[in-house]
Image (tube, rainbow, N blue to C red):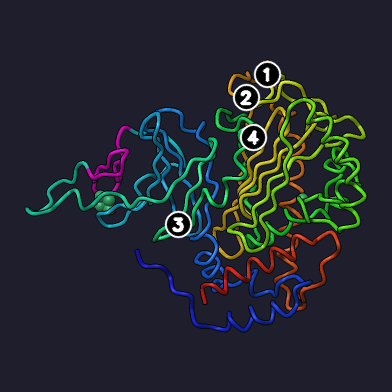
Amino acid sequence: MIENQIPNSGLGKLIEAARREPGRALEQEFYSTPEFHTADMQSVFRKQWLLAGHVSSIPERGQYFLFEIGKESIIIVRENEDCVNAFYNVCRHRGSRVCLEKEGRRKLLTCPYHAWTYGLDGTLKAARLMPEGFKKEEYGLHACHIRLFEGLIFINLSNGTPPDFDEAYRSMLPLARQQGLATAKIAFRQSYPTKANWKLVAENFMECYHCQPAHPEYCVVHPQDQLLAFGAGPGSGSDEAAAAYQPTLDLWEAESSTMGYLNDTIDAGVFSLGMQQAVRYPINPQRGFLSETIDGSPACKKFMGDFRQADGGETALAFNPFSYVLASNDFAVMFRWTPRDEMNTDVEVTWLVHEDAEENVDYDPRKVVHVWDTTLKQDKKITEDNQAGVCSESYQPGPYSTQEARNVVFKQWYLDQLELLL
Ligand code: FES
Ligand code: FE
């Protein structure tokens, strides 16, 4: 496959200028131009492992779903109990999309155009009326790198060898495993298509400076001192706020440890593959919250993974700036953002519960989704308003607050990714 080339424009100069202002947001061009969208696809989205979904959405042989990003569509299909495959949704005959519906179940993947037919392993099984000498074995669907991690499906669009998944994420395995993600099932899914560049979506998720003005419900669930300390993950607040919260954190950790639970903090830093982080912290110990619900009571009677007794903790796994899991003892939320173009981003969110939990018996789906559904609708609105303002001729990148420390890290990480390409 031929990669799109980065146009030899003024990208390098804009990157250089952005480097000189590490404490400010990016210039307009980064958020609005097709040139930067192309550069982002090449330098970030073709390199990173992208969280695409959860295995429980395709339990049966032949079940598939499409993962769409930029101009790409990837078929993620279960071949058998042990094997999930990923293929570019591009027919090897004349290039039609092979699967048109977003999800479904097929015995074979038949192209709707001239009916070339592929197996669930991607091999071409049938092609009518082809001339003598045509070799079916040369026309299998192009495979896409895929990796399962505790039930989470990651794909990678690299043309060559992708970055080492284990090296980047091995250390996050114990926290993911404790949470029981591998055997979870989907309770609810929701899309929040956002008219904004993916970086505005990502940057919004990396700071909690906006939480107080924009998220009244979220601020009921999480106490102010915690939001100031690390409302958007380790290192998102100031050092002073983190130090002020540390005694509360220590106290909770000691209690959680007596229940036998693992509490770790991993922060791989700006030079890592995806600036990945993994951490556990209490949701609201001052008010005795046991789950990330509006009243703090668990939304599901069956707890996930190793949790038998509620410790009121939240597990946060950040694989990269567009792939996250946040989980209470009783349910987990998977988040992914994928760019469609320079000013449209798919925000896809999936709520997971214990595989044996029965809807309306063990859990009320409305209670499971309430806090994040409310928060994500608010995020969609503020991010779209952010994009509208950034597109103005009068826009100038403003300075980050002490609550946006993670955005400073993201900016450096992002510019590093772009520079590797130039
Ligand atoms: Fe698929 Fe012709 S393009 S069979
Ligand atoms: Fe938010």
Dot 3: few (<14), some (14–19), or many (≥20) neighbours within 10 Å? some
**Disc with the residue nearer the chain's start (2 vs 3):** 3
Q: Does mark 3's beta carbon lie closer than 8 Å to ligand 1?
A: no
| Residue that carries the numbered disc 4 in the rendered image | 351
| Residue that carries the numbered disc 1 in the rendered image | 360
**Disc with the residue nearer the chain's start (4 vs 1):** 4
Dot 2: few (<14), some (14–19), or many (≥20) neighbours within 10 Å? many
Q: Is residue 343 left or right of residue 45?
A: right
Dot 4: few (<14), some (14–19), or many (≥20) neighbours within 10 Å? many
Tell me the element at label 1.
Answer: loop
Tell me the element at label 2.
Answer: loop
Residue at 58% x, 65% y: name it: 342
Q: How far is the residue under mark 4 from the one under mark 2?
A: 11 Å
Q: Does mark 4's beta carbon lie closer than 8 Å to ligand 2?
A: no
| Residue that carries the numbered disc 2 in the rendered image | 354
- Residues in magenta, as a range: 107-124
| Residue that carries the numbered disc 3 in the rendered image | 162
**Front residue of 134 and 355:** 355
Q: Amino acid at mark 1?
A: Asn
Residue at 57% x, 54% y: name it: 338
**Disc with the residue nearer the chain's start (2 vs 1):** 2
Q: How far is the residue under mark 1 from the one under mark 3?
A: 42 Å
Q: Quadrant of the N terminus?
A: bottom left
Front of the two marks 4 and 1: 4
Relative to residue 236, is residue 119 depicted above or below?
above
Q: Amino acid at mark 4?
A: Trp
Residue at the outermost top position: 361
**Disc with the residue nearer the chain's start (1 vs 3):** 3
Image quarter for residue 80? top left
Relative to residue 13, is residue 268 depicted above or below?
above
